[in-house]
Image (cartoon, helix red, strand yellow):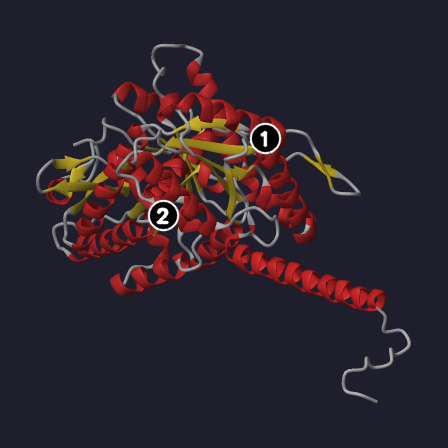
Amino acid sequence: MSALEPEPTQPGCGPADVDSRVRELERQVHALMAELHLSRRKHCTAPVTDPLTGVGNRLAFVDAFQAARESANAGGAPPALLLLNLDGFTALKKSAGHAAADQVLMTAAVRIRSAVRENDVVTRLGGDEFAILLPATPLNRAAAVGNRILAALEPNIDLGGNSVRCGASMGLRVAEPHHTVEDLLLEADMAVEESKVEGRNKLRMFDPATLHARQLQRHIAGELREAIRSDQLVLFYQPIVELATGRIEGAEALVRWNHPVHGLIMPDQFIPVAETTGLIAELGRWVLRTSVRQLRSWRDSPATEDHDFTMRINVSAADLQSLAFVDDVREALAGAGIEPASLVLELTESAVIQNNELDRYTLASLHRLGVGLEIDDFGTGYSSMGYLRKLPVDRVKVDREFVREVGKDPSQLDFLAAIQQVIRSCGLEGIWEGIETAEQAEALRSIGCSSGQGYYFGRPMPEAEFTARLSRQLTWPA
């Protein structure tokens, strides 16, 4: 065969078959390229996507904020942030389980996306917290979007066997030029907290006064922490007296802050800050240790040893929730050499009315230790006598409001006698606050009240003045 002659054609290798194979090869290449592009897109979006809900995550929020801020710096309008927490989500997770909670989160994400605009960025920062960044959006328009979201979240969510309502508490903050991501989130979160106070499914806009209050609170907390550690705190003492004899039976320790600049600061100005910032436990330990050491000093001094009375200190709800509190009391008593019965812990009704497991454990442990337990300001909020029999308390301090009208309203004394009878029927002792006159003291004594406290017997006094009174008088008032 000559080299110029064409080769014989193989079966199935005609031009049509070649074209078919090429087309198949091209299809496979296109399929591989599409799969590669999809894989690349998934790889690129995975770091900025919340895996549960499919919305953006914190990184996506930061990226969106940076882009919106750059646009605002170039002359555009600033972005706005809507931050929300789902109402009742923690309780739902405990009662219905994690699977139900996840379903609620996924449904909430879908509903939020349905209520926002095309350019708004929906993200989940963690837990039940969602952040929606609205680029170049004024306050009124952002509020309108926020209210649409709240309306979308309002209907019940079907969980199969049952349905739940899952509204939200929402805060709104329009970004300022100086804002960092954390600044914006912090101020929006303040608005969320205000929304929670107002009630469920509410939108609250950031109030600069809230930020100022937080900053002031942090400043006071820092100064208070230093005050506890540098002897700026002082205790004042007020006598509790046997009405029949005038003998002192107790001294209530009341803390004051002797501020180096502002002078003497009363507890109602710093105790709330201590409670909010978590300093109340440290403050309480200082009062406990200082007061029992002072009681030891009075008992050891020849000038005051003739008096035999208890020390009363106030206990916070946070103390009852602390597993270490009973040990703190035990160690303070042992360190001062004071028997437990010489210490009486005063608890407000609101602190003991919760009646949860940890409170019951702490109260029972204190009762076994042998310290006295007393309900302070009784009758101010609950006025329910039923729980008195269930608590291991020894005494009830009746609020001063009940004594105020003694001598003015003839029927008031009969009412107080009835309260005293109920207290006794529960096996408790009653201490009556707010006694300001001899007439009030005598009226209460006449109906069988045994103990009293008030300005008639003595105002709260610093240690030196109280010690001087102890050294020169056996009965109160002098």
Q: Amino acid at mark 1?
A: Ala
Residue at the (25%, 21%) spot, across then down: 437
Q: Amino acid at mark 2?
A: Val
Find residue 10 and report its horizontal and vertical position in percent: 88, 79
Q: Nearer the viewer, residue 379 or 477?
A: 379
Q: Which residue is mark 1?
A: 115
Q: Is residue 4 visible?
A: yes
Q: Nearer the viewer, residue 373 or 190?
A: 190
- Quadrant for the N terminus in the image: bottom right
Find residue 262 and report its horizontal and vertical position in percent: 11, 36
Whole-angstrom CA distance, mark 2 to mark 1, is: 58 Å
Find residue 232 and report its horizontal and vertical position in percent: 14, 47
Label 2 SS: strand
| Apparent side of residue 453 relative to residue 156 in the rendered image (left or right) | left
Q: Is residue 314 visible?
A: no
Residue at the (60%, 59%) spot, across then down: 37
Foreground disc of the pair 2, 1:
1
Mark linked to residue 17: none
Q: Is residue 21 above or below residue 477?
A: below
